[in-house]
Amino acid sequence: MKTIRIHLDAHAHIYPFYDMERLLLAALDHMPRTAPTDLRAIALAERHDCHVFQALAQDELRLPPARWKMVAWDPDGGIKVRHLPDHRDLWMLAGRQIVTAEKIEISALFTDDEIPDGRPARDILRQILATGGLPALNWAPGKWLGKRGRLIAALARETPPSDLLLVDTSLRFAGWPEPALYRTARRQRRTLLAGSDPLPVPGEEKIAGSYYTTFSIPFLADPSRIVAPLKAAFQSGKLSVALNGQRGSPPEILQRLRRNSQAKAQS
């Protein structure tokens, strides 16, 4: 079977104050294109006050036309943009991030439907699936420990592998052991992805694409339709993935978290 290789940053934020061009170029620069057919993509994790995907889809946000062009639109939740100076393409996939009542983060891949923060995690999982999205639990410092860690483990036990993914993030610095839940996920054939998770601090745009997943899926019958094949691959239990890129050293991650705390204190 003919396949196509995809490099995917599975947890990318675009905050209103970001330099969006800088973020898109960072994602293109970080993720390789080792064959002409390779595709690069970022899965958005837009929080309640972020609506970049919607703005692009509705032509309310335009990238500079001398340098960027939208070259494909997948109605299931994908926009492909091209950097005209070097003809590099990047898929942007719809996705939301929801903070549950228990203060854990759940991503909704492949949907731009608004889901309010603050509801119980199990309710949010059900709502994401009802919208046609695919839920993902994202690793974050401290949020996979203690009471919240037990909840995350329970959600993984209760939810079929096809209905819940895991996403490792760049905030798990190099040398930090993998959570036991990752090993369990691999045994269950639950898809484990990787994402950069830029923080809401100016300058974090440069992180986009720095930690990503590489995998292959059947060649796209329609090159403008990527969402349905990706979703099917993630739910199949047969996907072989590699986590690539860099997560940063302990000092680098601590500095990023410190800047994020300072930004929160000043807001």
Image: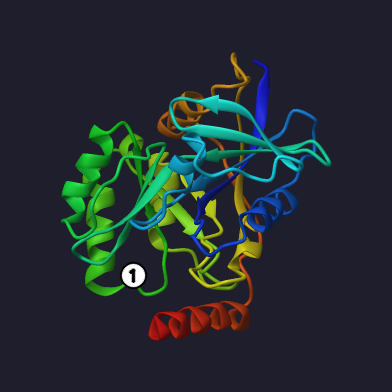
Q: How is the image coloured?
A: rainbow
Q: Is residue 101 left or right of residue 4?
A: left
Residue drawn at x 56%, y 59% is 196
Residue 121, position as x, y percentages in the image = 21, 54
The quadrant holding residue 204 is bottom right
Residue drawn at x 43%, y 52% is 45
Residue drawn at x 60%, y 26% is 72
The quadrant holding residue 118 is bottom left
Q: Is residue 8 left or right of residue 131?
A: right
Q: Is residue 164 left or right of residue 191?
A: left
Residue drawn at x 42%, y 36% is 110
Q: Count the numbered circles shown.
A: 1
Q: Secondary structure at mark 1?
A: loop
Q: Amino acid at mark 1?
A: Lys
Residue 31, position as x, y percentages in the image = 70, 49
User: Which quarter of the rendering shows the N terminus?
Assistant: top right
Q: Pointer 1: what residue?
A: 143
Image: 66 above or below 116: above
Q: Is residue 66 left or right of residue 123?
A: right
Image: 256 above or below 4: below
Q: Nearer the viewer, residue 261 or 159?
A: 261
Residue 126, position as x, y percentages in the image = 20, 41
Residue 226, position as x, y percentages in the image = 54, 26
Image: 62 above or below 173: above
User: Which quarter of the rendering shows the C terminus?
Assistant: bottom left
Q: Would you call the spot at circle 1 few (<14 residues within 10 Å), some (14-19), or many (20 or more)?
A: some
